[in-house]
Amino acid sequence: MVASPKKWHRLIQSIPGQAYLWLAVLIFGSSGAVTRKVTEIGSQNLINGRNPISLCNVLFVGNICALIVMTLIYRQQWKKAHLRQISRKNWFILTLVAILSGAVAPSLIFQALELTEVNNIILVGRLEPPLILALSFWVLKERVSIWEVVGALAAFLGVILAIFLQTPEQEIMKVGSFNLGLGEFFTAIASVAVAFSTIMSKQHLSRIPIGIYNIFRTALGTVIFFLSAIVLYGKEHFTDPFSPLLWQWMLFYGVVIIVLGQSFWVKGLRNASVSVASLVGSFTPIAGILAAYFILGETPTQAQYIGGIVILLGIFISQFGIWQQHHPKVTPNGVESAPIQQNIETKVGFKGI
């Protein structure tokens, strides 16, 4: 016997917010491995010697899919009354944020995916939370607990161990007496860019609705990335953006990573506390490493194990400090602001867009 729509509605409503957060984290954690996998599929189906599912095409078409989805979700927020309330100064800051987090950071991450293992990107990307914590204390004068400081230092140490204890197999650069892989370097710079954009958002953009924030950031970031790629690599770099194979996989990518992932995340944020959302988001590195193993067959190296264990130790120390603060609900009225969402999302890292 098929359940009635009302029963299905009641069943869905009974699902706790934590469940949605866990589903979102599983999806986001696998995004790096899925991105690498679809580009490998493209390399096996070349068009005139070109990969139709290149990382640049994935980023460009993925952002278009994201814009379509976000426009459908947040179109009500794009009203003249809301737009007029944003000052010129805030538009300028929002533009800087869009350049850093919507163009520079994603471009560097996708470039890193071509140069190093997904596991390295996941671990080095954990530079972001301690950087944001340090900048919050220094720039915003926010109070931080000793547990958060110790956890951030441990996570930072874990990243350093993961980087310098291994021998890069790809292109490298010299840092003093150490060798640093270019992929790891690009990931570190991307983390710095996101950290600064997050601080600017928290300091100046607290009243901007999340729909305006996300759509403007993604749209401007896509345009800047597209123009930059044409200047740097030539217009032939986007020869196959309308390839049926590309769109076939991007529809799958878009539905799973963008639609389901973002929908579960927003639903979970609306029904869970900050401490719970932050704790669940902290498991994203584990989900990412497991996804890299099952999807790509990447086995963590000894350096990654050592660095990863220290990073996880730092994460749980930080979570203990957050748990002690007893934060209220993230979105008691069901509407998120940009800085609140970004503050939680720093626990998640790369989400495939």
Image: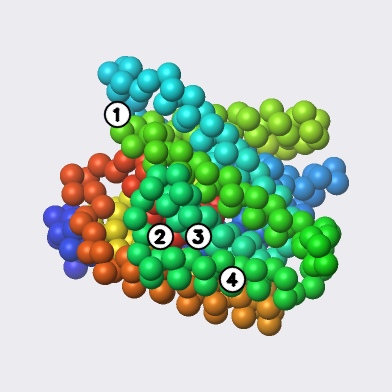
- Asked if residue 233 can be seen in this view, the reply is yes
Sequence-wise, the earlier of marks 4 and 1 is: 1
Is 117 positioned to the left or the right of 262 in the image?
A: right
Marker disc for residue 76: 1
Q: Nearer the viewer, residue 218 or 97?
A: 97
Q: Residue at x 80, y 67 (%)?
A: 178
Foreground mark, 3 or 1? 3
Distance from label 3 to label 1 (Cα)? 35 Å
Residue picked out by circle 3: 130
* Element type where label 2 sits in the image: helix
Q: How far across and down, in percent of the image, does residue 111 sit?
A: 71, 50
Reading the image, the residue beneath label 2 is 24
Element on which disc 4 rests: helix
Where residue 123 appears, as percent x and y from the top left, is: 59, 66
Question: What amino acid does circle 1 point to?
Answer: Gln
**Residue type for callout 4:** Leu
